[in-house]
Image (spheres, helix red, strand yellow):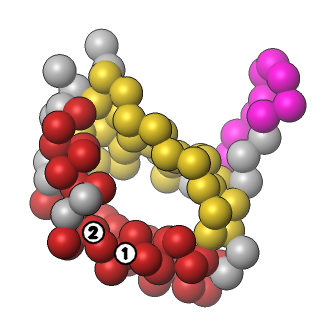
Amino acid sequence: MPALVVVEVEIHDPEMYEEYKKLSLPAVEAFGGHFVVRGAQTESLEGDWNPQRFVVLEFPSVARAKEWWSSEQYTIAKKIRHQASHGKMLVVESV
């Protein structure tokens, strides 16, 4: 069953975050994933949720998404993301 990785990001070093974006794409693709939403404008319809940056990735399965997240290939990009931003990330089965 496909899986979505949903990410809310607050960037505090935009230049460094650009480097993360360059490194993350090949790692995502290596695990069969692709970006569904990558930093698009958001509009809150209910509540006070208003993320600065919102990202949605799709992978073939939850297991594959977790393999990507913990992979050696994504490790360098993840370290840069942690230095350049603060975020929240979920993985969920899709329908």
Residue 39: x percent and y percent? Answer: 57, 54
Instruction: Tell me: 23 left or right of 9.
Output: left
Q: Are marks 2 and 1 in contact (CB under 8 Å)?
A: yes
**Measuring 16% from the left and 43% from the top, which residue is drawn there?**
64
Up-down relation of residue 48 to residue 35 (above or below)? above
Q: Quadrant of the C terminus?
A: top left
Q: Nearer the viewer, residue 89 or 15?
A: 89
The boundaries of the magenta stretch are: 41-49
Amino acid type, mark 2: Tyr
Residue placed furthest toward the top: 95
Q: Is residue 7 above or below residue 84?
A: above
Q: Quadrant of residue 71?
A: bottom left
Describe residue 68's horizontal placement relative to residue 55 as left or right.
left
Query: On the image, numbered disc 1 is attached to which residue?
Result: 77
Bin the neighbour count of mark 2 within 10 Å (Cα to Cα): few under 14, some 14-19, many 20 and up: many
Q: Which mark is residue 74?
A: 2
The answer to whether residue 82 is above or below residue 47 is below
Which corner quadrant holds the N terminus? top left
Q: Is 50 part of what is drawn in magenta?
A: no
Image point 20% across, 72% down: which residue? 73
Left/right of residue 13 with respect to residue 59 in the rendered view: right
